[in-house]
Amino acid sequence: MRTKTSNNEFTLEFPSRSSNEGFARSAVACFAAQMDPTLNELEDIKTAVSEAVTNAIVHAYPDTIGRVVVKGRICQDNVLEITVKDRGRGIADVEQARQPMFTTGGEERSGMGFTIMESFMDRLSVRSVPGRGTTVVLRKRLAPRVKSGK
């Protein structure tokens, strides 16, 4: 049972291949476009989604290909909500994982994914159960645009 009302929504599911990160980012941007975001808002959303999806691809399924689900909803008060969910290995300590520079992905990872997501979105929540997966919810209220003309 849904408690929040939604003006529109989508669900996208794909294999955890790195080539699908750009697909997810573009799909979310196309969906968000109906809210008439500024270019800066759109770039912020794309960056945060890119980080969330990359985390799922790299960390949830390090040795296998799994499924990533991205859901988007337009909520009341011009709020865009994006959920990125996996059924991968999960995060043992979410608070530690949210600390800047912490990573389990090796030297090539910066450990800044959650920090970047937080800086570009209004709200970030992370739920994870080791061995069962992780759900990241990103929320951003878009500024109302003034329509020109009469």
Image (cartoon, rainbow, N blue to C red):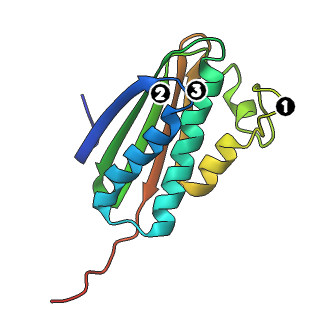
Residue tagged by mark 2? 85
Please state if 45 lies on the left or on the right of 34 as rendered: right
2 in relation to 88, above or below: below
C-alpha gap between disc 1 and disc 3: 17 Å
Disc 2 or disc 3, which is closer to the eye? 3
The residue type indicated by label 1 comes to Glu
Residue at x 70%, y 37% (from the top left corner): 98
Q: Quadrant of the N terminus?
A: top left
Q: Earlier in the sequence, mark 2 or mark 1?
A: 2
Secondary structure state at the residue bearing disc 2: strand
The residue type indicated by label 2 comes to Lys
C-alpha gap between disc 2 and disc 1: 25 Å
Please state if 149 lies on the left or on the right of 32 as rendered: left
Residue at x 44%, y 39% (from the top left corner): 24
Disc 2 or disc 1, which is closer to the eye? 1
Q: Earlier in the sequence, mark 2 or mark 3?
A: 3
Residue tagged by mark 3? 57
Q: Quadrant of the C terminus?
A: bottom left
Q: Residues within 10 Å of mark 2 (few under 14, many from 20)?
A: many
